[in-house]
Image (spheres, helix red, strand yellow):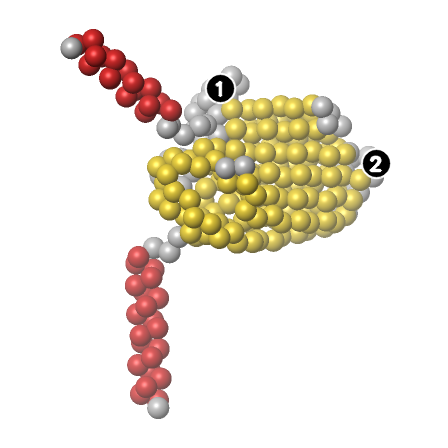
Amino acid sequence: MNKWLLLGVGALGLATSQVQAAPLTLTLTQGANTVTVVDGVGSDAALDDMVNFNGALGTFNINVSTALAAPGAQSFPSLMDLNSINVGIGNLVIEATKTFAGLPAINDLLATIGGTLGSSGSASLLYEILIDGVEVTEIAAAGSNAAPFSDSDFAAFAEDGEYDLTLRITLNHTGSGFITTSFDAAAQTVVPEPAALALFGAGLLGLGVVRRRKA
């Protein structure tokens, strides 16, 4: 009987470990060159929901990229942020991914991005947010000579329990010399709080009373 009890406890421990959220991961790809930084692994020994890469990659001489994620169930309203400064020529893909588990249901997602494009040249950028590998929203931008840009977009979806969130930036630099692009991209949840809804309802009620008195 003790043997079966121990086996049951071991199986329970295995099942528990399988549902734990995967750590934040930052991946940069330039042509055949790829670098991956995993939170809490190797050079990023501290498991703190922040990963960073600073160095050259392929035809990009300078890359300073940082990804941050809100820990655990404290992920409201901001889930993930990805910011980067990149100097070089050609195409560069930057991805930040994390598995979130045990979170309340999400009704909407807000994607925001801003920065400067193509100092000393031309640049285009595509910002995508993916849930479980499926794109839910994207923002495109193009510019030159350090043109500032900013944009945002909503994605309506419903997720709870466990899901993979990915922020992906695809960057293209055209020209010669040292072309620079910098950006800060974020994904935020949009979940109305009960208190906010109550205040909103009270405001509508007061507005109705005022209108009736004026009538």
The residue sitting at the right extreme is 176
The residue identified by callout 2 is 176
Q: Indicate the position of residue 118 as horizontal and vertical percent values.
A: 74, 43
Quadrant placement of the N terminus = top left
Q: Height in image: 143 above or below 174?
A: below
Q: In the image, what residue type sits under mark 2?
A: Ser
Q: In the image, what residue type sits under mark 1?
A: Val
The residue sitting at the bottom extreme is 215
Label 2 secondary element: loop
Could you tell which of marks 2 and 1 lies nearer the N-terminus? 1
Q: Find the distance from the CA under tag 2 to the CA under tag 1.
A: 36 Å
Name the residue at 28% across, 15% down: 10
Quadrant placement of the C terminus = bottom left
In this view, the residue in front, 59 or 16, is 16
Q: Height in image: 1 above or below 65?
A: above
Could you tell me how many numbered marks the image carries?
A: 2
Disc ID at residue 174: none
Residue 63 seen in the current view = yes
Residue 74 seen in the current view = no
Name the residue at 52% across, 28% down: 25
Residue 114 placement, left or right of 88? left
Q: Indicate the position of residue 30 as horizontal and vertical percent values.
A: 70, 28
Tell me where residue 128 sits by quadrant: top right
Label 1 secondary element: loop
The residue identified by callout 1 is 41
Q: Height in image: 53 above or below 172?
A: above
In this view, the residue in front, 100 or 65, is 100
Q: Indicate the position of residue 115 as horizontal and vertical percent values.
A: 64, 46
Circle 2 packing at 10 Å, graded few (<14), some (14-19), many (20+), is few
In this view, the residue in front, 138 or 49, is 138
Circle 1 packing at 10 Å, graded few (<14), some (14-19), many (20+), is few
Name the residue at 30% across, 81% down: 209
